[in-house]
Image: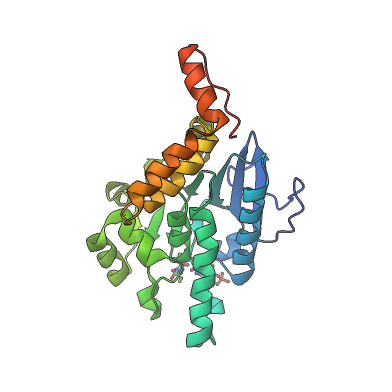
Amino acid sequence: MDLFEVSNHNNHSKMNLENIATALKDGIFTVTINRPSKLNALNIKTMDEIEEVMDHVYDNPDIKGVIITGSGTKAFVAGADISEFAGMNPISARKFSERGQEVFASIDNCHKPVIAAVNGFALGGGCELAMACHFRIASDNAKMGLPEVSLGIIPGYGGTQRLSILVGKGKAFEMTMTGDMIDANEAHRIGLVNHVVPQEELVAKAEKIMKKIMSRSPAAIGQLIACVHAAGSTTGYQTEANAFGNCCKTEDFKEGTSAFMEKRKPNFTGK
Ligand code: COA
């Protein structure tokens, strides 16, 4: 089976998905956007399914971490589905944007780690999806960009905000004003992705990092996700202090400190 070939058989859950394939193995939940004939473009149905999948991630204690990728070897996600743009008016377009922002916020705000494995084109809504993940790993053929101005629109799923935070306003202005794609090495250079690897090693690299994260305290990781999100806000330091306090109430804290003193590996439960 090809590395990125996926089946839509979601027999481990009650989800009924058409455009997303999922697989749960050893606590890692792999979510594959699966419309390869349309380069995995995000139509409304796929956005609904991402929401359903994220609900499942929040609720299922067997899921410890999430990897989001695209099916095939060409595209992660080539954007929102442009064929659905026709007929939008200012009110429906605003709702479309708010809905996308809400769905992607459920990824960004997830208390479990979410990594994007960017396996090709990540354009428009696809780049925004990758940016909604906690961090990104790219294959060497990846191309990323926010080309919306060439369609007479702008990014609407959080892209103007997240890109500015990730790469700074100057680079974000250039990328969004020109609409140019950047390659994986440039994305790495500007901090949009953390690692670039050959495509056949992409999932393995994401899994390796995820396994390391999963060996740490899930309770602490949930707290730190909220803290990193609060960076730059007026309440960031207070959020950190509160979260530090919250950690000390957990069994993971007792286990982690005891294991260190007893010179053994901790066995975290996330409680
Ligand atoms: N929405 C809807 N369909 C899309 C799509 C999108 N964002 N991106 C690609 N597709 C479809 C194409 O229409 C084509 O479908 P068809 O075979 O039924 O005609 C199929 O996916 C393959 O794409 P194609 O353009 O033929 O591939 P390519 O290799 O020539 O070009 C891209 C690849 C990514 C450069 C090109 O597809 C593209 O520019 N896509 C749009 C990117 C974009 O503007 N995204 C932002 C949207 S907000």
Q: Is residue 225 left or right of residue 251?
A: left
Q: What residue do we see at 32% from left, 68% from top?
A: 176
Left or right placement of residue 85 versus residue 146 in this view = right
**Which one is nearer the viewer's eye here, 218 or 7?**
218
Instruction: Determine the residue positioned at 53% across, 25% down.
Output: 254
Determine the residue positioned at 43% across, 60% down: 127
Report the front residue among 85 and 159: 159
Does residue 215 appear in this view?
no
Q: Where does residue 110 sit, x and y in percent of width and height?
A: 53, 50
Q: Quadrant of the C terminus?
A: top right
On-image quarter of the N terminus: top right
> To which quarter of the image does residue 161 belong?
bottom left
Q: Residue furthest top?
A: 262
For residue 261, above or below residue 60: above
- Residue 231 is situated, as x and y percent measured from the top left of the image, at 34, 51
Residue 244 visible in rendering: yes
Q: Residue furthest left?
A: 170
Image x and y of residue 66, in percent? 56, 45
Give the x, y percent position of residue 126: 47, 61
